[in-house]
Amino acid sequence: MEPVRYDDRQEIVSLPLQPAAAKKRRNWKKHLYAALLLLPLLLFIIGFFVVPMLYILYLSFIETKGEAGAIYSIGNYVRFFTDPYYLHSLWLTIKVSLYTVIVSLLLGYPVALTMAKCSPRVRGLLTLLVASPLLISIVVRNFGWYLLLLPNGTVHQLLESLGITQSPPKLLFSETGVVIGLSNAYLPFMILSIATSLYNIDPSLEKAAAILGAGPFRSFVSITLPLSLPGIVSGIVLVFSMSMSAYVTPALMGGANVPMLPVVAYDQIINLLRWTYGSAVSYVLLGITLVIVTVFTRMMERGRYREVFR
């Protein structure tokens, strides 16, 4: 009797083939479910962000001239870039934001490095301490700094008792006071951004560098610092963007002596009722911030350490 041979091809041929239309229908259903889940968020963003921003953009191109009514032009933007006062406010905003970034980076990097090197228990405690100021309103924190930086406040009394100065230092209603307030407000964002990158660095890299004869400083410059650049860039972008758009801190700590653009835009819209010009000032601030952030990130991503950002 001849043995029965088993042919695998018969089983393969007998399998039901799924038509392409069924796969497309299944993919279409997946996209539909995803769209339905995102619909509330999309409606919120469109209704409370996109539509108001488009309306402000529309107002920025309206120029009112007495009885002639409203005409559409770029006169508001031309006025901004030809007025020395507003150009000074723009430069002041950029300068204060850069100072805030530098102070936050210098103060935040050692804290983030300590969090990355310590034990998980201590790291959790430090993370709680770093994030705890975010639980307090920025207005309350600014009023606290307001009392500390007064000419007869605690800071002046301490400096005077130590013999460092005899006259009250000009800390309040100055650029220094605004930088102090902004640094205090946005320092946690810098620390947490840098710490996230430091957590991802393999500890064996530093051990290998030590075996090859590299000291702590050389190991930090060659390994730790380059690998933490993504976190540094993220922290710089966050702190700079929020400092450029901050209103409460410059208004309380700087007042009329530090006319940053958010304060100027607020005065134009609320106090002077110049909605169209205030809208133009707001969009100039938005455009300048986007340009600076985009140029900075592109330079870092295409620079010497571009491989780190991949």
Image: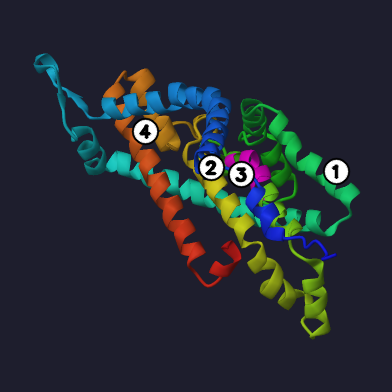
- Nearer the observer, disc 1 or disc 2? 2
Tell me which corner region of the image, top left, top right, bottom left or bottom right, holds residue 47: top left
Q: Which label was assigned to residue 125? A: 1
Q: Quadrant of the N terminus?
A: bottom right
Disc with the residue nearer the chain's start (2 vs 3): 2
The amino acid pointed to by label 4 is Ser
- Nearer the observer, disc 3 or disc 1? 1
Residue 5 on image: x %, y %: 78, 63
Disc with the residue nearer the chain's start (1 vs 2): 2
Residue 26 on image: x %, y %: 56, 35
The residue beneath circle 3 is 183
Residue 235 on image: x %, y %: 60, 50
| Range drawn in magenta | 182-190
Tag 1–tag 4 contact (CB < 8 Å):
no
Tag 4–tag 2 contact (CB < 8 Å):
no
Looking at the rendered structure, the secondary structure element under dot 2 is loop
The residue beneath circle 4 is 282
| In this view, 149 is above or below 59 | below
The residue beneath circle 2 is 19
Disc with the residue nearer the chain's start (1 vs 4): 1
Disc with the residue nearer the chain's start (3 vs 4): 3
